[in-house]
Image (cartoon, grey):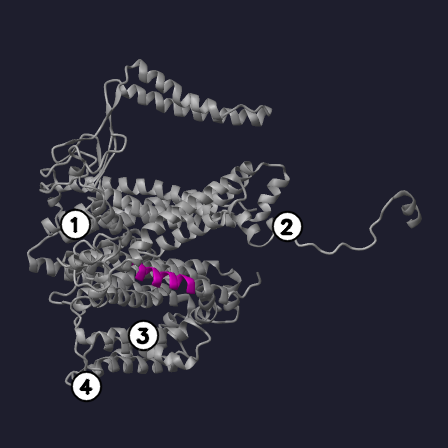
C-alpha cells in the first residue's frame, strides 16, 4: 500500500495538524448572537423591532422611575419640586404607606400586629411548603391561626385559646375513635370540640382583659392587609371543602353526587362579583331575623365557596388521572372507603393536582381585589377611594397603580415559581 | 367503594343500616338528603320571615316600570323612559358585545404571543415571556382601571381639537382619540345597500365552495388548482361591481367637532375600550400559555416524520402539527372565553353598562329588589356558561382521539 502511495501521490502529510480554534463566527457570544438574533433577514427585522419597542418602553419608564420625588406632602409640592422635569410623585407612597397597607381605620399604634402576623405567616408556612425545614416548626403552623386571629382582631387571648383547646380535645377524641371507624372519629371529634368550645366560651366570657390587645372590628380592616387576610383564609378553608366536594362528585351515591355536581356547576357558572352581591345585599334575607354578622365574614364565606368549587374540579382531575388499578389495589387490600381515600388515593391525587391548586390560589388572590366593588377598602378600594379622591393626591395615578400592580405581581409570581419548584421536587417518575 | 361483602343470612336487622355495605349507602344518602332539606327549610323560613318583617314580597313587576336612567352606550333604542327589562336587555347585549370583541382580540394576541414565545429568536421569546408573566400575575381589575385611567387622564379632551392652534388633531381626518372615547367613521346604509351586502355574503359562500371543489379535484385527479388569487377575486370583484352599479349606496359618516363634542360617526366609549383592551391583554396572556403548551404537546417525532415524507415546513404546520395541537388547545381556549364573559362583569368598575351594571347595579339600587335582580343576573351567566360547556362537550367528543 505504502509503496503504491509513494509512487502515485506526490505528497502525503505524515503528521497531524494541530487543532485550530473554530472561526470567530461559530463560537461563543458571536455565534449566539448570530443564531438567536440575526439568523435570517426576517429574524433580524424582528430583533430590531423588538429592540426599538424595549427602547421606547425604557426611555419612558426609567426617567419616570429614577427622577421620582419621594418626600413631599402633596401633589402640588411634588410638581414644584419636579419643576416640569419628568419623574413620578412617589411621595404618595411614602405619605400614604400605612393607608395602602392597613387601610384607614386600623389603630395607628397597632400596625405592628398585622406586620407580626405577616412575618409569622412565613414561619408557619415554611414547614408545610419546604420539606427540609425542621418538623418541630409545625407547632407554629398549628398555633398560627389562633395567634394570627389574636394579633389582627385583638381582644383577650382567652378566646383563641378556648378555640385551640376545643380543637385539641376534639383531635384527641378523633385519634382515639378513628381506629375503629373514621366516621365515628370525625363526628365524635367535632361534637366534643363544639361542646368544649361552648363550655370554654361560657367560662371565659367574663375574663375579657386577660392579655388583651385593643379590639379591632372587621370593618376597620383595609389595604393590602385585607387582600392578604381574604386570600390566606379563603384558600386554606377552601382546600378541605374542595376535597370533600371532589370526592362527593366522584362517589357512587347518586344523591350526594347530584348535590355536589349542582353546587360546583352553579358556582363555576356565575362570576364572583354576583356572589359578592349576594354577600352584600341578599344573604341577610336568608339568615334568622336580627342576625347581624359583618360583611367581611359574609365575603369570606362566599369567596370560600367560590374557590372550593374550582379546587374541587382540579382535584377531580387528579382523581380521574389516577390509574384504576390504584382504586382496585386499595379495595383488594380490604381497606374501607375512608382508609382507601386517606392512605392511597388522596396523597397521589393531591400531588397531581398541585399545579392546578396553585393556579386557583393565585387566581383567588387576584380576585380578592373584587371586594372593592362592594365598597370594601382593600388595596384597590383604598387607591380608588380615599387616596385618589383626596385633594392632596388627586391625579397621581401611575405611581399608585404601579405600586398595587407590583405588590400583586411579587406575591403571585412568587407563588407560581414555588409551585414549579415543587413540581420538580415531587417528580418521582423517570424523565 | 364497590366492595360487596358476602350476602348475609337471616333477616334484616336495624344495625345493618350502619354496618352492612349493602344498606349503608342508603343511610348516608338519606342523612344527606335530610340535612339538605333542613338547610333549605331553614333558609326558606328565614326568607319568608324577613320579607314579611320588611313588608316586601317577591315580584318581578319592577321589570315593566320605566327605568329612569340613561345609558350612554347602547346597541338598541333606549331612553330613560324605557322599562327596566329593556335596560337589562341593553346590558345583556353590551355584555355579549364586549365579550365577543375581547374573545377575538385575546385569541389573536394569545396565538401571536404563544407562537412567538417558542421562537428561536431569543429576544422575542424573552419579551413574550415577560408579557405573559406580567399580565397573568396582576389582577384584571387593576388592568381595567389602569387602561381606563390611560383613556380618561392621558388622551385629550374634545376641545383640544378645536380652534386654529389645536393641540390635538384627528388621525386621517376620520379617527379622533379623546378622553370620552374613540370616534370612528360610521357606515351609512343608503337604499340598495342590502344588495351589496347580499352580494358580498354570496361571494363568501362561492369562495368556500370553490376551495372545497379545488380540494376534491386534487384528491380525485391530482390536478392542483390555484386557490389564492381566485378566492380573492371571487370575494372582491362582484361586490365592487355591484357597489358601483348601484351608485355607491354605502357611505361613511365622519365624526366632526361640533360645539363641545364630536358629532356623527361611531362613538366607542372609554369604558368599553378600557374593558375590551384589558380583558384582551389579560386573557391573551393565558391563551398564549395554552397555545404554547398545545404546540409543545405535539412530539418532535411528528414534525420529523412529516419532514421525512418530504412535506414543506408550511404544510408540516398545516397538515401535521396544527390539527394535533388544536385538540389540546381548544378546550382550555373555550374556558378562557367563558372567563372573559364572566370577567366582563367587572364593567361595573368603570361604568360600562353591561348586565351587571344595569340590572345588578342601577336597577337593583333604584328598586331595592335585591333578590330578584341577583337571581336574574345569576341565571343569565349560568345560561351562558352551561350552553358554552354543552357546546364544548359536543366538540370534545367529536375531536377526541378515536382509540381502538
State which tag comes first along the sequence, 3 or 2: 2
A5 lies left or right of B378 = right
The picture places residue B208, in percent across and down from the top left corner, at: 44, 26
The residue pinned by badge 4 equals: A210
The front one of B171 and B358 is: B171
Question: What's drawn in magenta, residue-wise?
Answer: A405-418
Residue A71 located within the stretch drawn in magenta: no
> In the image, which disc is placed on residue B361?
1
Q: Nearer the viewer, mark 2 or mark 4?
A: 2
Give the residue at x 28% y 21%: B194
> In the image, which disc is placed on residue A23?
2
The picture places residue B58, in percent across and down from the top left corner, at: 13, 51
Label 1 to label 3: alpha-carbon separation: 39 Å
Say whether marks 3 and 2 touch (CB < 8 Å): no
Is disc 4 surrounded by few (<14), some (14 to 19) or many (20+) residues within 10 Å? few
The front one of B391 and A370 is: A370
Amino acid at each position: 500500500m505504502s509503496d503504491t502511495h509513494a509512487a502515485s501521490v506526490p505528497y502525503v502529510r505524515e503528521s497531524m495538524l494541530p487543532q485550530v480554534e473554530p472561526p470567530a463566527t461559530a463560537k461563543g457570544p458571536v455565534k449566539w448572537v448570530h443564531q438567536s438574533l440575526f439568523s435570517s433577514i426576517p429574524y433580524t427585522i424582528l430583533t430590531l423591532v423588538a429592540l426599538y419597542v424595549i427602547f421606547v418602553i425604557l426611555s419612558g419608564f426609567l426617567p419616570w422611575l429614577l427622577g421620582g420625588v419621594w418626600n413631599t406632602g402633596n401633589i402640588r409640592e411634588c410638581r414644584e419640586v419636579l419643576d416640569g422635569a419628568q419623574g413620578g410623585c412617589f411621595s404618595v407612597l411614602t405619605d400614604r404607606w400605612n393607608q395602602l397597607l392597613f387601610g384607614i381605620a386600623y389603630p395607628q399604634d397597632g400596625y405592628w400586629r398585622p406586620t407580626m402576623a405577616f412575618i409569622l405567616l412565613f414561619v408557619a408556612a415554611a414547614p408545610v411548603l419546604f420539606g427540609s425545614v425542621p418538623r418541630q416548626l409545625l407547632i407554629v403552623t398549628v398555633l398560627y391561626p389562633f395567634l394570627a386571629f389574636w394579633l389582627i382582631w385583638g381582644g383577650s387571648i382567652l378566646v383563641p385559646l378556648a378555640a385551640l383547646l376545643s380543637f385539641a380535645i376534639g383531635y384527641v377524641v378523633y385519634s382515639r375513635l378513628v381506629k375503629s371507624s373514621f366516621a365515628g372519629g370525625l363526628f365524635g371529634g367535632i361534637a366534643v370540640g363544639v361542646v368544649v368550645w361552648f363550655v370554654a366560651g361560657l367560662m371565659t366570657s367574663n375574663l375579657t382583659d386577660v392579655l388583651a390587645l385593643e379590639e379591632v372590628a372587621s370593618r376597620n380592616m383595609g389595604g393590602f392587609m385585607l387582600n392578604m387576610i381574604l386570600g390566606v383564609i379563603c384558600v386554606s378553608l377552601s382546600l378541605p371543602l374542595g376535597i370533600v366536594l371532589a370526592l362527593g362528585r366522584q362517589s357512587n351515591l347518586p344523591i350526594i353526587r347530584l348535590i355536589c355536581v349542582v353546587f360546583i356547576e352553579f358556582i363555576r357558572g356565575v362570576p364572583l362579583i354576583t356572589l359578592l352581591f349576594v354577600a352584600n345585599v341578599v344573604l341577610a334575607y336568608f339568615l334568622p331575623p336580627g342576625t347581624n354578622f359583618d360583611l367581611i365574614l359574609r365575603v369570606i364565606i362566599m369567596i370560600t365557596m367560590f374557590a372550593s368549587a374550582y379546587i374541587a374540579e382540579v382535584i377531580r382531575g387528579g382523581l380521574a388521572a389516577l390509574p384504576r388499578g390504584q382504586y382496585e389495589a386499595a379495595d383488594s387490600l380490604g381497606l374501607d372507603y375512608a382508609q382507601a381515600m386517606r392512605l392511597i388515593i388522596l396523597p397521589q391525587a393531591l400531588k397531581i393536582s398541585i399545579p392546578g391548586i396553585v393556579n386557583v390560589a393565585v387566581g383567588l388572590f387576584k380576585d380578592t381585589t373584587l371586594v372593592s366593588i362592594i365598597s370594601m377598602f382593600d388595596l384597590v378600594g383604598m387607591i380608588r377611594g380615599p387616596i385618589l379622591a383626596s385633594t392632596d393626591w388627586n391625579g397621581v395615578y401611575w405611581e399608585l397603580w404601579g405600586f398595587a400592580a407590583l405588590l400583586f405581581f411579587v406575591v403571585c409570581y412568587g407563588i407560581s415559581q414555588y409551585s414549579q419548584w415543587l413540581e420538580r421536587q415531587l417528580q418521582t417518575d423517570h424523565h | 367503594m364497590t366492595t360487596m361483602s358476602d350476602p348475609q343470612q337471616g333477616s334484616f336487622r336495624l344495625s345493618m343500616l350502619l354496618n352492612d355495605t349493602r344498606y349503608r349507602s342508603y343511610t348516608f344518602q338519606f342523612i344527606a338528603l335530610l340535612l339538605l332539606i333542613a338547610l333549605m327549610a331553614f333558609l326558606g323560613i328565614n326568607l319568608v320571615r324577613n320579607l314579611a318583617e320588611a313588608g316586601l314580597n317577591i315580584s318581578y313587576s319592577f321589570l315593566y316600570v320605566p327605568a329612569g336612567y340613561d345609558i350612554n352606550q347602547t346597541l338598541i333604542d333606549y331612553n330613560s323612559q324605557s322599562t327596566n327589562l329593556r335596560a337589562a336587555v341593553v346590558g345583556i347585549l353590551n355584555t355579549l358585545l364586549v365579550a365577543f370583541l375581547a374573545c377575538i382580540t385575546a385569541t389573536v394576541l394569545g396565538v401571536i404571543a404563544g407562537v412567538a414565545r417558542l421562537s428561536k429568536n431569543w429576544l422575542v421569546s424573552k419579551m413574550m415571556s415577560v408579557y405573559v408573566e406580567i399580565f397573568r400575575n396582576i389582577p384584571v381589575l387593576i388592568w381595567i382601571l389602569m387602561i381606563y385611567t390611560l383613556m380618561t387622564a392621558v388622551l385629550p379632551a374634545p376641545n383640544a381639537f378645536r380652534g386654529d392652534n389645536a393641540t390635538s388633531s384627528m388621525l386621517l381626518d376620520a379617527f379622533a382619540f379623546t378622553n370620552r372615547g374613540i370616534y370612528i367613521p360610521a357606515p351609512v346604509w343608503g337604499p340598495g345597500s342590502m344588495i351589496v351586502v347580499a352580494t358580498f355574503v354570496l361571494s363568501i359562500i362561492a369562495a368556500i365552495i370553490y376551495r372545497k371543489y379545488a380540494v376534491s379535484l386534487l384528491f380525485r385527479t391530482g390536478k392542483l388548482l390555484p386557490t389564492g388569487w381566485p378566492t380573492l377575486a371571487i370575494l372582491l370583484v362582484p361586490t365592487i361591481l355591484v357597489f358601483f352599479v348601484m351608485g355607491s349606496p354605502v357611505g361613511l359618516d365622519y365624526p366632526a367637532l361640533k360645539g363641545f363634542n364630536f358629532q356623527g360617526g361611531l362613538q366607542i366609549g372609554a369604558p368599553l375600550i378600557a374593558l375590551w383592551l384589558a380583558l384582551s391583554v389579560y386573557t391573551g396572556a393565558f391563551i398564549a400559555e395554552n397555545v404554547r403548551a398545545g404546540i409543545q404537546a405535539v412530539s418532535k417525532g411528528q414534525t420529523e416524520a412529516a419532514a421525512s415524507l418530504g412535506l414543506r415546513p408550511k404544510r408540516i404546520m398545516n397538515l401535521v402539527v396544527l390539527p394535533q395541537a388544536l385538540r389540546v388547545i381548544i378546550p382550555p381556549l373555550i374556558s378562557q372565553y367563558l372567563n372573559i364573559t364572566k370577567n366582563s362583569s367587572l364593567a361595573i368598575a368603570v361604568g360600562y353598562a353591561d348586565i351587571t351594571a344595569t340590572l345588578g347595579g342601577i336597577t337593583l339600587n333604584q328598586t331595592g329588589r335585591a333578590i330578584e335582580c341577583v337571581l336574574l343576573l345569576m341565571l343569565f351567566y349560568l345560561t351562558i356558561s352551561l350552553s358554552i360547556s354543552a357546546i364544548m362537550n359536543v366538540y370534545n367528543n367529536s375531536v377526541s382521539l378515536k382509540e381502538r
